[in-house]
């Protein structure tokens, strides 16, 4: 069986790393047929009138799965985030970032195995802002019971499906008693009603950050609202070597977008030195997702082969510059392919 997947190369280093990942999947004989679409600055440069063209959204709705490279988001001005728009438009409410130690990447910690589950559509990160008067702006943090229940159920089902052990909710309900209070009440409600066998805890987020950097091995699945999830998933990535070694997925009821969670790095774009590992890891997540959706054991085996190949490449010292190595994008891609 062949699976049609939308490929969004993105901006900056996006096309380089995205096409490297495609080359690895092709070498592994993954039965993927790509439909390439544009988003971000790349869309404008291709003559589109919008950063997120309707044709790109329609393609994802049609094929239901996409692999996406990074898209540029300007800081402190300019256009709004393509990533946020994509998640809201397609209702990709559940973000998943697995963070695990890699044998070939030395950090302060050796046994990190954390999954960050993030509500992806509400909260401060949704970007609802207004200028009340000159020099005065407000940002609105929205939390709804439906969305809080939905992401809590998502997290607990993930724990059961993946044979994990514990959910830790990070919050600031001691200060934001209504919004974060609703979030933790919904998490408790879902756990008590449907998943009482799963270990559960709640931690105020500032104290939780301290505990994370003291001993990340005490954590398993982290559940949190949108902005906290964005910040904490990067912190967790730092425990295992950075965003270059962490994949990501945005999941909804009707579509799934797998993406490299790092930025577009325009300063090194076109130099052939970007690390394609994160988007390759995201592609492996995508293959596993498709294998589960379609009960395709062979596809799961292909995903495992790719993961074993890049794990072995790292152990053998094959690294790009961001990991302390010397390999180019093409050389690292070839190193993974040779170990398939």
Image: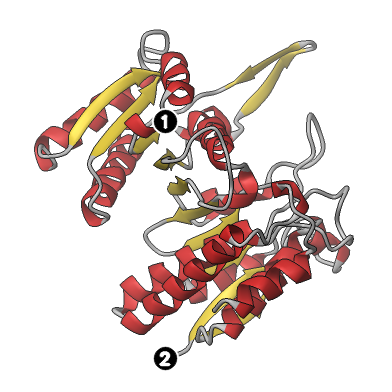
**Mark 1–mark 2 distance (CA, rounded to whole Å):** 40 Å
Q: Does any portion of residue 263 appear in the rendered image?
A: no
- In the rendered image, the vertical position of residue 110 relative to residue 266, given as above or below: above
Vertical arrangement, residue 254 with respect to residue 97, above or below: below
Relative height, residue 51 to residue 123 (above, below): below
Query: Along the line of sight, which residue is nearer the eye, 66 or 136?
Result: 66
Rendered location of residue 236, percent (x, y): 51, 35
Q: Residue furthest bottom?
A: 1
Q: Specify few, some or many for label 2: CA neighbours under 10 Å numbering under 14, 14-19, or 20 or more.
A: few
Mark 1 or mark 2, whichever is nearer to me: 1
Measured as percent of width and height from the top left, residue 164 is found at: 25, 47
Quarter of the picture containing the N terminus is bottom left
* Residue where numbered disc 2 is placed: 1
Labels in figure, total: 2
Q: Residues within 10 Å of mark 1 (few under 14, many from 20)?
A: many
- Which residue sits at x=61%, y=33%? 127
In the structure shown, which secondary structural element does the residue marked by tag 1 occupy?
helix
Residue 307 shows in the view: yes
| Residue 36 disc label | none
Vertical placement of 302 versus 71: above or below? below
Q: Position of residue 2 (x, y in %)?
A: 47, 89
Q: Residue sitting at 86 percent across and 68 percent down?
A: 47
Q: Residue at x 71, y 67 (%)?
A: 332
Looking at the image, is mark 1 or mark 2 earlier in the sequence? 2
Q: Which mark is residue 216?
A: 1
From the viewer's perspective, is 313 left or right of 71?
left
Secondary structure under the numbered disc 2 in the rendered image? loop
* Residue 107 or residue 197, whichever sits in front: 107
Question: Residue 234 placed where, x, y %?
Answer: 57, 36
């Amino acid at each position: 069986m062949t699976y049609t997947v939308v490929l969004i190369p993105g901006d900056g280093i996006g096309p380089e790393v995205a096409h490297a990942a495609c080359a690895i999947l092709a070498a592994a004989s993954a039965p993927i047929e790509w439909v390439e679409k544009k988003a971000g600055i790349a869309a404008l440069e291709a003559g589109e009138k919008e950063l997120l063209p309707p044709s790109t959204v329609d393609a994802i709705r049609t094929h239901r799965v996409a692999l996406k490279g990074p898209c540029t988001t300007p800081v402190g001005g300019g256009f709004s985030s393509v990533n946020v728009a994509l998640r809201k438009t397609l209702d990709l409410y559940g973000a998943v970032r697995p963070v695990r130690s890699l044998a070939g990447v030395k950090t302060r910690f050796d046994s990190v195995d954390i999954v960050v589950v993030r509500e992806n559509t509400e909260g401060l990160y949704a970007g609802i802002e207004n200028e009340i008067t000159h020099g005065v702006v407000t940002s609105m943090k929205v939390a709804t019971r439906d969305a809080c229940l939905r992401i809590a159920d998502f997290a607990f089902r993930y724990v059961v499906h993946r044979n994990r052990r514990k959910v830790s909710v990070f919050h600031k309900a001691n200060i934001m008693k209504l919004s974060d209070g609703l979030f933790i009440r919904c998490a408790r409600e879902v756990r008590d009603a449907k998943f009482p066998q799963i270990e559960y805890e709640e931690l105020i987020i500032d104290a939780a950050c301290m505990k994370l950097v003291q001993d990340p091995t005490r954590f398993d699945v982290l559940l949190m609202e949108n902005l906290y999830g964005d910040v904490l998933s990067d912190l967790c990535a730092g425990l295992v070597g950075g965003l270059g070694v962490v994949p990501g997925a945005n999941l909804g009821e009707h579509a799934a977008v797998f993406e490299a969670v790092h930025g577009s790095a325009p300063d090194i774009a076109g130099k052939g030195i970007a690390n394609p590992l994160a988007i390759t890891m995201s592609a492996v997540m995508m293959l596993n997702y498709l294998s589960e959706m379609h009960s395709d054991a062979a596809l799961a085996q292909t995903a495992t082969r790719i993961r074993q190949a890049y794990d072995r490449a790292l152990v053998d010292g094959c690294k790009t510059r961001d990991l302390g190595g010397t390999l180019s994008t093409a050389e690292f891609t070839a190193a993974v392919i040779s170990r398939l």
